[in-house]
């Protein structure tokens, strides 16, 4: 049985993408293990219902908040290598699967010491993403460029990001693994959960936002649209993050704004089913955001809830091809106009043949990529 080791700087039990990939590979016959870090950010941990050895280390460098961010990342990288490398080498993996750039140098070292194949799983366009300074972006790109020759296969989250990596760093065996949720066909149909929980009137439509409550995700634009008095709809924010406290204050001040605590990944789709529309208004604050295909887009899709989304190329392509919603410009007036139109319309969306967006379809691509490098 071939051994597959996943390395990440996140908490594996809180990372649905990593868990789904590990589960897929375990079902395909790999002896799966993972090493991540312990994190306390308000996310909900998921139970691991497949055979895997998952370990987590504590990173003391995360507490060095007085250091400049770039220096702190370098210290974190050193700590990751010191603590994880001996553990990883002892596992003697056949394939080491690195999630994001921070653990890529570690993965290359594991490859050199064990002869393992190396899979680089870029959860974003790593060198041009929200929150990175120009210096951090250049350093990230430099790390990817230097280590590119060691990578046997590349996984990305959208076609545009795949094209970017091939053009900027060179063509690799690669595949696009969408951030699709596990879809249980036994899930109940639409319900009144959110309407009952927040006492939302029957005549008002419910818009839901799912995900990280942080900067660059359109939250200020959404809240401004809903507090200006022009809309009869209500909005529910579901998640956790740095803007939680701010949204809590707004939810106490405005009767049409509501805040729901984060739930486990398995409960997201059932909760979303009780909304009328999903919001995926990502802001163009980085190339990674402009090329993104966020988890929430697919969570809305498989909940059967149409989406109002940013007019970005990959997002528009999915929405247009599958008839799952509409796009708008990221301006308060445009958002308000789009929501007013939705309020006054009984338009039905086709949700035509979304099977290619399902996790079942992503599993097939993942297994095929592994077969190519083994």
Image: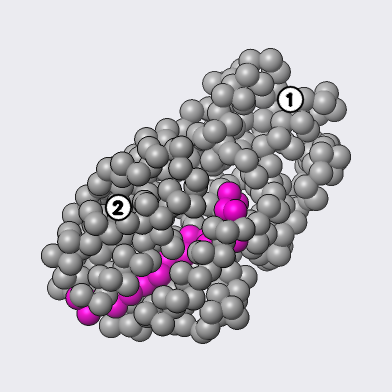
**Residue 297 in sight in this render:** no
Q: Secondary structure at mark 2?
A: helix
The part of the image, by quadrant, that contains residue 63 is top left
The label on residue 23 is none
Is residue 262 shown left or right of residue 217? left
Q: Residue at x 54, y 21 (%)?
A: 197
> Disc 2 versus disc 1: distance between alpha carbons?
55 Å
Horizontal and vertical percent position of residue 213: 57, 36
Q: Which mark is residue 79?
A: 2
At x 51% / y 84%, what residue is drawn? Answer: 171
Q: Which residue is mark 1?
A: 203
Q: Is residue 269 above or below residue 366?
A: above
The rendered magenta stretch, by its main secondary structure, is classed as loop
**Which corner quadrant holds the C terminus?**
bottom left
Numbered disc 1: secondary structure:
loop
Residue 135 appears in the picture as rendered: yes
Query: Going 16% across and 70% down the picture, which residue do you hit?
Result: 92
Horizontal side, residue 152 vs residue 211: left or right: left
Residue 119 highlighted magenta (yes or no) = yes
- The residue stretch that appears in magenta: 114-133
Residue 194 coordinates in the image, percent (x, y): 56, 27
In front here: 350 or 170?
170
């Amino acid at each position: 049985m071939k051994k597959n080791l996943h390395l990440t700087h996140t908490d594996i039990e809180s990372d649905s993408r990593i868990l789904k990939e590990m589960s897929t590979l375990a079902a395909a016959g790999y002896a799966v293990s993972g090493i991540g870090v312990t994190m306390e950010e308000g996310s909900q941990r998921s139970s691991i219902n497949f055979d895997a050895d998952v370990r987590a280390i504590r990173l003391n460098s995360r507490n060095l908040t007085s250091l400049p961010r770039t220096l702190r990342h370098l210290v974190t990288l050193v700590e990751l290598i010191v603590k994880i490398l001996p553990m990883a080498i002892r596992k003697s993996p056949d394939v080491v699967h690195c999630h994001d750039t921070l653990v890529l140098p570690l993965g290359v070292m594991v490859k050199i010491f064990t002869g393992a194949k190396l899979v680089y799983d870029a959860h974003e366009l790593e060198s041009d993403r929200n929150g990175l300074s120009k210096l951090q972006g250049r350093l990230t790109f430099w790390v990817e460029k230097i280590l590119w020759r060691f990578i046997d296969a590349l996984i990305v989250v959208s076609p545009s990001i795949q094209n970017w990596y091939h053009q900027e760093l060179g063509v690799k065996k690669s595949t696009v693994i969408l951030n699709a949720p596990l879809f249980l066909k036994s899930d109940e149909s639409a319900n009144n959960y959110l309407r009952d929980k927040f006492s939302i009137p029957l005549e008002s439509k419910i818009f839901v936002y799912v995900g990280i409550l942080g900067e660059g995700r359109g939250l200020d634009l959404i809240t401004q649209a809903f507090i200006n008095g022009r809309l009869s709809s209500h909005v529910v924010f579901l998640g956790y993050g740095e803007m939680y406290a701010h949204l809590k204050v707004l939810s106490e001040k405005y009767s049409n704004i509501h805040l729901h605590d984060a739930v486990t990944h398995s409960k997201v789709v059932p909760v979303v089913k009780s909304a009328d529309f999903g919001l995926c208004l990502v802001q163009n604050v980085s190339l990674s955001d402009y090329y993104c295909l966020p988890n929430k887009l697919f969570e809305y899709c498989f909940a059967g809830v149409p989406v109002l989304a940013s007019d970005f190329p990959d997002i528009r392509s999915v929405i247009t091809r599958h008839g799952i919603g509409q796009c708008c410009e990221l301006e308060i007036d445009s958002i308000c106009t789009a929501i007013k139109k939705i309020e006054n319309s009984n338009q039905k969306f086709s949700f035509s043949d979304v099977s290619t967006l399902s996790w079942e379809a992503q599993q097939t691509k993942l297994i095929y990529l592994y077969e190519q490098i083994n």
